[in-house]
Image: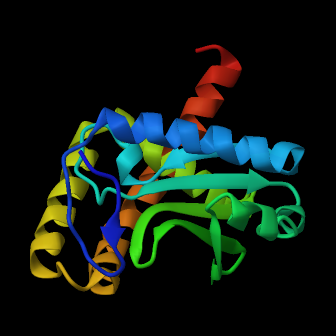
């Protein structure tokens, strides 16, 4: 199983345990570089969902209480292969790993505890616990990958409605799970 794709392309592969071990190695590397400037780092995205296919690009969310402290370490990150690509969404910064246009990792720097942080973690956890929704998401991804193998923007755009539905379910599920664990039920 390989890791990485050329920028803009969409190729899906069956889930691989290699993705999890690679993500954990990458997280360890990030923690070694960034130390206490980060609060947490988590393997996210489709490669972190056990029962579905994914583009073989490892996504990692890095949560920091002070994102500026991490941004101030961009030179150190770049020397270690984490290339800063800027703010890809409000409040979220993107780093990539790879060579040239061949990308292996997306590192998403966000404020720890923000809605974006929770969305990443909740979606992963929800889909790992709800196989019917995971299967529906995988089927949509496969259909779109067949239609748009060279247009990642269109592929991503057409997933957004289902992702928003899943995020709404995941938030309710997480709130119920937290409430149940708080009461001991």
Return the residue nearer the eye: 128 or 150.
150
Coordinates of residue 129 in the picture (x, y in percent): 37, 33
Relative to 51, residue 64 above or below: below
Coordinates of residue 61 in the picture (x, y in percent): 61, 54
Q: Name the residue: 63% across, 71% down.
A: 83
Quarter of the figure with the C terminus: top right
Q: Quadrant of residue 175?
A: top right
Q: Residue furthest top?
A: 184
User: On the picture, is 124 further left or further right than 158?
Assistant: right
Relative to 8, residue 134 above or below: above
User: On the picture, is 53 further left or further right than 43?
Assistant: left
Coordinates of residue 47 in the picture (x, y in percent): 37, 48
Return the residue nearer the eye: 104 or 20.
104
- Residue 164: tell me if it is visible: no
Quarter of the figure with the N terminus: top left
Q: Name the residue: 38% across, 64% down.
A: 163
Q: Name the residue: 65% across, 38% down.
A: 28
User: On the picture, is 7 further left or further right than 13?
Assistant: right
């Amino acid at each position: 199983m390989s890791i990485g794709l050329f920028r803009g392309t969409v190729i899906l592969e069956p889930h691989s345990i290699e993705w999890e071990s690679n993500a954990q190695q990458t997280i360890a590397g990030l923690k070694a570089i960034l130390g206490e400037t980060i609060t947490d780092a988590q393997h996210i995205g489709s490669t972190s969902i056990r029962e579905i296919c994914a583009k073989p690009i490892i996504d990692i969310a890095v949560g920091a209480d002070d994102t500026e402290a991490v941004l101030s370490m961009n030179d150190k990150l770049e020397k270690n292969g984490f290339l800063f690509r800027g703010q890809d969404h409000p409040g979220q910064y993107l780093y990539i790993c790879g060579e040239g246009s061949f990308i292996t990792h997306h590192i998403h720097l966000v404020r720890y505890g923000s809605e974006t942080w929770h969305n990443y973690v909740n979606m992963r956890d929800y889909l790992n616990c709800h196989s019917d929704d995971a299967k529906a998401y995988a089927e949509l991804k496969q259909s779109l990958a067949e239609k748009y193998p060279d247009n990642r923007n269109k592929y991503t755009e057409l997933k957004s409605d289902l992702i928003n539905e899943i995020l709404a379910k995941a938030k309710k599920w997480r709130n119920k799970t937290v409430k149940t664990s708080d009461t001991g039920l």
